[in-house]
Image (spheres, rainbow, N blue to C red):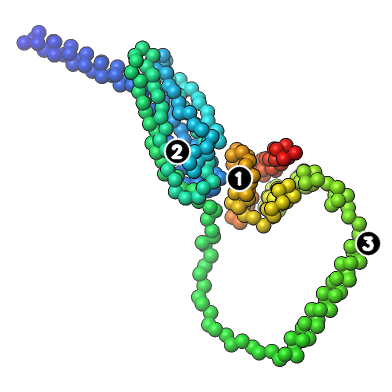
Amino acid sequence: MTNWKNWNFLLTIAFVCLSINLCIAQPAIQSSVNKKKILIGEQFTLTIKADFPKNIYNFRWPILSDSMAHFEVTNSRIDSLYTDQNLSSIIQTITFTSFDSGKWVLPSFLVKVDPIQHDTAFNFYTDSVPIIVSFSTSDITRQIRDIKPIKEAETIGSIWYWIGALIVLILLIALFVWWKKVKRKTPLSSSQSKLTAYEEAMQELKNLEGYDLSIREEVKIFHSKIGLIFKKYLSRRYQPAYLNKTTDETLLLLKSENHNHELLSKLSAILRCGDAVKFAKYLPPISDSRDCKKSVEDLIEVIQKIKS
């Protein structure tokens, strides 16, 4: 009986060791996204992490095209991490963006694992994730007011219409005469007649250095001017009137010009920062405001090289 108990104890110990060894030997792969709802042109990341014993497996990560249905890849990188002497981790981070509004499903991706000492390979698939792509939300905080009662329209004698029309006509004639005199006396300055769109934009961006970015009102003017300078440059380069376009409309127009996705993503962050300053009273750090100005200068440089 004692001999049987010893054998039973040894078999239990062997089974536990074998189970631990199998658990350690099996690679563990996880995937996750940092956002499930984005604005059009905004970026989000898919992270794939694999934990495995060293010198046992070879990993073949997903090979992604630059564009897929509803989503576009802007960046992909692989990092290695050693947690202890035997276990290591590899992390692949893939950055996506989208310019199609709606609810789309980020597809599942295949990760192949080849054991070094065996012929049988493992296939792992990442989770498919629903992603909502939307335009900038409208302001729904405004108070709904009661409907006012109907007021009786006041009637005005026809003679006052004629008097009013005569006054407007006299003012228009006076304004026209004044404009002709000013136009005849004031020649076009060199900045209006000779500067290219690129030179004008760079000069105006340089003029922004005089603003005190520690004062809220000056920060608001600073970011407003950044957006206006960039849209004015685009209007002179591409002809469409960008000055009256929203952030979303500007991004979609530039996408139609076949600019790369990284440029559009940077521009999206700059314009949305300006919108937050103007409409949401957001006060960014001074370094962020300066980075926005520097990024606009870099974007204009890139566009200038593409179109020249």
Residue at left offset 71%, top offset 48%? 238
Q: Is residue 203 visible?
A: no
Q: Nearer the viewer, residue 174 or 286?
A: 174
Q: Are marks 1 and 2 in contact (CB under 8 Å)?
A: no
Q: Amino acid at mark 3?
A: Lys
Vertical side of 182 occupied by 145: above or below: below
Task: Look at the image and tell me in which quarter the N terminus lies.
Answer: top left
Residue at left offset 53%, top offset 82%? 149
Q: Position of residue 21 (x, y in %)?
A: 29, 17
Q: Position of residue 137 (x, y in %)?
A: 52, 55
Dot 1 crowding, Cα within 10 Å, few <14, some 14–19, many 20+: some
Q: Are marks 2 and 3 in contact (CB under 8 Å)?
A: no
Mark toward the start of the polypeptide (1 vs 3)? 3
Q: Nearer the viewer, mark 2 or mark 3?
A: 3
The Cα atoms of the two marked residues, 2 and 3, are separated by 63 Å
Q: Quadrant of residue 297?
A: top right
Q: Amino acid at mark 2?
A: Val
The Cα atoms of the two marked residues, 1 and 2, are separated by 25 Å
Name the residue tied to disc 1: 255
